[in-house]
Image (cartoon, rainbow, N blue to C red):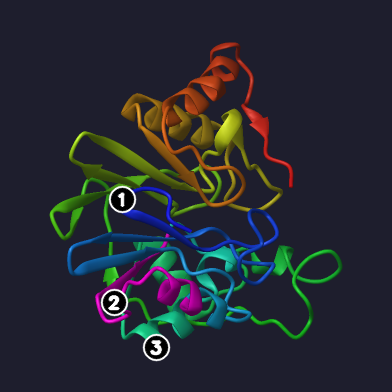
């Protein structure tokens, strides 16, 4: 599904557009010229639908040389190992997330709280994955003539990153699970979720004044994405946490 000149949606599960496996987050493909990057990797229950969506974009698989992850939760990182192998792509994440993935640490990635009744099926396992590069706040990755800026955005989970795509005429934001359309956030009963960090993250993202807002689930905003973040800021300014995302 083409969203903009540079951005395609190639994965989306039951919390979005039901394009690929139900547990997948939104998986975005950023393309410019002969270079392409995947943002997040889905759950990894079945990555073939994501690969087929890439093929339908008309983008050759060979330029997709990097997979950049927002955070370690299984719906975002579980597909990294399989997609990396299928695409011969490097996996990149924050130092914290890189550590969790390399060790296959279910507790650190909060997978121990998400499996079982109402969560992941018993046969699903959190897969260890090699990480080729660690990303730090303020770092910029080139994608063709574009730049993808790394943003440290904790709150939903530790080591969470968002990515700002700097393109001619504007900025688009890939916010992972840090912020969603309609001023929503996602706070969960897990060890590394912090309301205080989440509100600071929303404030930082709102200050970017992004055009597009492309979160990990739910609705996307092609233009005026900043107004969705401003809606969350209204709650924060009133001394409240932003409203919760519901599926």
Q: Residue at x 55, y 24 (%)?
A: 232
**x and y, in percent, of residue 197 in the image:** 50, 36
Q: Earlier in the sequence, mark 1 or mark 2?
A: 1
**SS at mark 1 in the image:** loop
Q: Nearer the viewer, residue 218 or 132?
A: 218
Q: Quadrant of residue 96?
A: bottom left
Q: Does the magenta run of residues contain 1? A: no
**SS at mark 3 in the image:** helix
Q: Which residue is mark 3?
A: 85
Q: Which residue is mark 2?
A: 132
**x and y, in percent, of residue 81 in the image:** 45, 82
Q: Which residues are magenta?
A: 51-69
Kindly report the distance in space between the C-alpha atoms of the residues bearing marks 2 and 3.
Answer: 13 Å
Q: Are marks 2 and 3 in contact (CB under 8 Å)?
A: no
**x and y, in percent, of residue 223 in the image:** 41, 32
Q: Which residue is mark 1?
A: 5
Which disc, if any, is residue 225? none
Q: Nearer the viewer, residue 86 or 203?
A: 86
């Amino acid at each position: 599904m083409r969203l903009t000149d540079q951005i395609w949606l190639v994965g989306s599960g039951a919390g979005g557009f039901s394009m690929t496996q139900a547990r997948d987050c939104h998986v975005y493909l950023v393309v410019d010229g002969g270079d392409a990057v995947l943002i997040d990797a889905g759950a990894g229950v079945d990555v073939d639908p994501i690969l087929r969506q890439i093929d339908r974009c008309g983008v050759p698989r060979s330029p997709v040389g990097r997979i950049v992850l927002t955070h370690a939760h299984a719906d975002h990182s579980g597909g990294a190992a399989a997609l990396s192998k299928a695409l011969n792509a490097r996996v990149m994440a924050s130092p914290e997330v890189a550590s969790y993935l390399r060790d296959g640490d279910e507790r650190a990635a909060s997978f121990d709280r998400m499996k079982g009744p109402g969560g992941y099926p018993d046969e699903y396992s959190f897969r260890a994955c090699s990480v080729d590069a660690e990303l730090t706040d303020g770092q910029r990755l080139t994608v063709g003539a574009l730049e993808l800026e790394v943003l440290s955005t904790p709150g939903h989970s530790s080591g969470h990153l968002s990515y700002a795509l700097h393109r001619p005429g504007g900025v688009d934001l890939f916010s992972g699970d840090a912020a969603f359309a309609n001023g929503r956030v996602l706070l969960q009963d897990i060890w590394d979720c912090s309301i205080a960090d989440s509100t600071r993250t929303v404030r930082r993202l709102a200050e970017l004044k992004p055009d597009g807002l492309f979160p990990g689930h739910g609705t996307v905003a092609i233009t005026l994405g900043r107004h969705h973040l401003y809606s969350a800021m209204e709650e924060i300014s009133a001394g409240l946490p932003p409203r919760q995302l519901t599926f």
